[in-house]
Image (cartoon, helix red, strand yellow):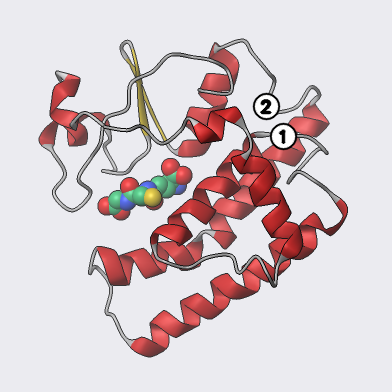
């Protein structure tokens, strides 16, 4: 939304004690969820495509069917494969939904570590994740890296220089710099 200069408000959700106002909007009880007038959209990829179709501004998906297919495939792969160790770590360490044991935790950490190596290699000969320019795939990957940082797992930039350079490119974008609101109103204020 910041890339497209679309005004918006952010509402914080307590994912360990989800407010009923939030559950009415997000049937799966997951963030992110977007409310745009009477339209409610969830699943980050669908939200991003909705914003792409709904608002002018830079095209972040691709100009041709072939380009859009490349970006969508990249995002699906990031979500269905790369994100999985982080989702499992969250299930064990944050939500307590899955049995927590050191071996399982280590397995997921190792897997994420190996994905970081793949990502580092991916950026050896390109500056952006897909199409040779900034797209929704970069936004998608950036949120994953931020989730991992939330777990205290960095990307080990000294070892993964290409990935580190991409992260710096991302963090130098105005949209990214402005994406951490100083204070976030509670979901109850959504008024639903
Ligand atoms: N595929 C979903 C994944 C969303 C997701 O897993 N969100 C997590 C936070 S990063 C969540 O809301 N978890 C709450 C829960 O699992 O109860 C998307 O891309 O929007």
Using the image, determine if residue 170 lies above or below residue 182.
below
Query: Dot 1 lies on which element?
Result: loop
Q: Is mark 1 within 8 Å of ligand 1?
A: no
Query: Dot 2 lies on which element?
Result: loop
What is the number of callouts on the image? 2
**25 left or right of 181 in image:** left
Q: What residue is shown at x 32% (from left), y 33% (from top)?
A: 182
**Front residue of 137 and 173:** 173
**Residue 159 locus on image (x, y percent):** 70, 72
**Residue 86 locus on image (x, y percent):** 45, 64
**Residue 84 locus on image (x, y percent):** 49, 63
Which residue appears farthest toward the bottom when viewing the image?
A: 103
Mark 1 surroundings: few (<14), some (14-19) or many (≥20) residues within 10 A? some
Query: What label does residue 16 carry, if any?
Result: none
Using the image, determine if residue 157 lies above or below residue 26.
below
Mark 2 surroundings: few (<14), some (14-19) or many (≥20) residues within 10 A? many
Q: Are marks 1 and 2 in contact (CB under 8 Å)?
A: yes
**Front residue of 57 and 176:** 176
Query: What label does residue 134 carry, if any?
Result: 1
Q: Is mark 2 within 8 Å of ligand 1?
A: no
**Front residue of 5 and 177:** 177
Q: What residue is shown at x 21% (from left), y 28% (from top)?
A: 185
Q: What residue is shown at x 32% (from left), y 27% (from top)?
A: 10
Residue at which label 2 appears = 60
**Front residue of 150 and 130:** 150
Q: CA distance from mark 1 to mark 2?
A: 7 Å
Using the image, determine if residue 122 lies above or below residue 71.
below
The mark closer to the camera, 1 or 2, is: 1
**Residue 66 locus on image (x, y percent):** 82, 32
Question: Which quarter of the image is occupied by the C terminus?
Answer: top left
Which residue appears farthest toward the right when viewing the image?
A: 125
Using the image, determine if residue 154 lies above or below residue 42.
below
């Amino acid at each position: 939304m910041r890339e497209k200069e679309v005004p918006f408000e952010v509402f914080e959700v307590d994912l360990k004690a989800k407010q009923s106002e939030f559950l009415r909007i997000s049937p799966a009880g997951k963030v992110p969820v977007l409310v745009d007038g009477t339209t409610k959209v969830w699943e980050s990829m669908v939200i991003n495509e909705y914003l792409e179709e709904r608002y002018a501004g830079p095209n972040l998906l691709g100009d041709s069917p072939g380009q859009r297919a490349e970006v969508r495939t990249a995002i699906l792969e990031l979500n269905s494969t790369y994100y999985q160790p982080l989702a499992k770590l969250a299930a064990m360490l944050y939500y307590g939904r899955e049995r927590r044991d050191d071996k399982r935790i280590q397995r997921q950490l190792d897997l994420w570590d190996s994905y970081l190596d793949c990502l580092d290699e991916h950026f050896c000969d390109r500056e952006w994740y897909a199409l040779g320019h900034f797209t929704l795939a970069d936004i998608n990957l950036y949120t994953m890296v931020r989730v991992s940082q939330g777990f205290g797992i960095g990307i080990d930039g000294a070892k993964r220089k290409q990935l580190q350079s991409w992260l710096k490119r991302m963090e130098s974008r105005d949209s990214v710099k402005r994406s951490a609101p100083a204070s976030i109103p509670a979901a109850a204020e959504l008024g639903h």
